[in-house]
Every structure is written in C-alpha cells, then in structure tokens.
Amino acid sequence: MTKVGIYEARNNFSELIKRAKAGEDVVVVARGVPQVRLVPVDPPPGHGTGGAILKWLNSAGPVPGRAPEELDATIAAERAAWD
C-alpha cells in the first residue's frame, strides 16, 4: 500500500491515478491519518460490443411468445438471405 500526503497527492495526482488503475493500493493521508483511497472504477460495457450484447441478452431473458427454436430459425433465414 502506498501512502501519500495531501500535498504530494496534489502534485502527483496523474501518476497516482495510473498506479491505482494498475492495481496498486493508494491512500491519501493527512497528518498520518488515512483520508481517502484511490481505486479504479469498472468501465461500463461498450455499447454494441459483443460482450455488451451478450450481457444484455442474458439479463433480458427469453423473448415472451417465441420459442428458442423459432428464434433460431428466424436468425438462420436472415443469415441465408445475406448470401
């Protein structure tokens, strides 16, 4: 764990952010007492990416009124039309 004073944190903020994003535990102290911890946030899934689409499909559940086989047949027919 890296402990830095407020003055040092202010002067080296960009470097401390890089270190926190790399997984290092960065704590800002005032007179030796921990005040805040810098931690990276998880980036939101990208809009339209394969991972984001799969996550949405898994969270949305099945489409009501259409069987999975019917959906598969519709997708297959659309793909065949592309050729």
Image (cartoon, rainbow, N blue to C red):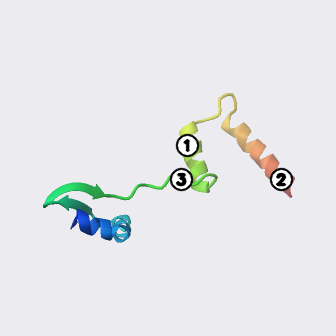
Q: Quadrant of residue 83?
A: bottom right
Mark 2 element type: helix
Q: Which residue is tagged 2?
A: 80
Give the residue pinned by disc 1. 58
Q: In screen coordinates, is 24 left or right of 45?
A: left
Query: Which numbered disc flags the more N-terminal residue, 2 or 3?
Result: 3
Q: Report which residue position mark 3 lands on.
A: 45
> From what the image shows, is residue 22 above or below residue 68?
below
Name the residue rendered at 86%, 52% in the picture: 81
Residue 73 in sight from this viewpoint: yes
At 68% from the left and 34% from the top, the residue drawn is: 67
Q: CA distance from mark 1 to mark 2?
A: 25 Å
Which of 37/33 is in front?
Answer: 33
Q: Residues within 10 Å of mark 3 (few under 14, many from 20)?
A: few
Q: Nearer the viewer, mark 2 or mark 3?
A: 3
SS for dot 1: helix
Q: In this rendered view, identify the residue nearer to me: 10 or 58.
A: 10
Pick whichever of labels 3 and 1 is earlier in the sequence: 3
Of the two numbered discs 3 and 1 in the rendering, the one whose residue sits closer to the viewer: 3
* Label pair 3/1, CB-CB below 8 angstroms: no
Query: x and y percent of residue 52 in the render?
Result: 57, 51
Amino acid type of disc 1? Answer: Asn
Q: Residue furthest top?
A: 65
Observer-nearest residue: 26 or 64? 26
Determine the image quadrant of residue 71.
top right
Inspect this view and state whether residue 1 appears. no
Amino acid type, callout 3: Pro
Q: Position of residue 2 (x, y in %)?
A: 23, 68
- Mark 2: which amino acid? Ala
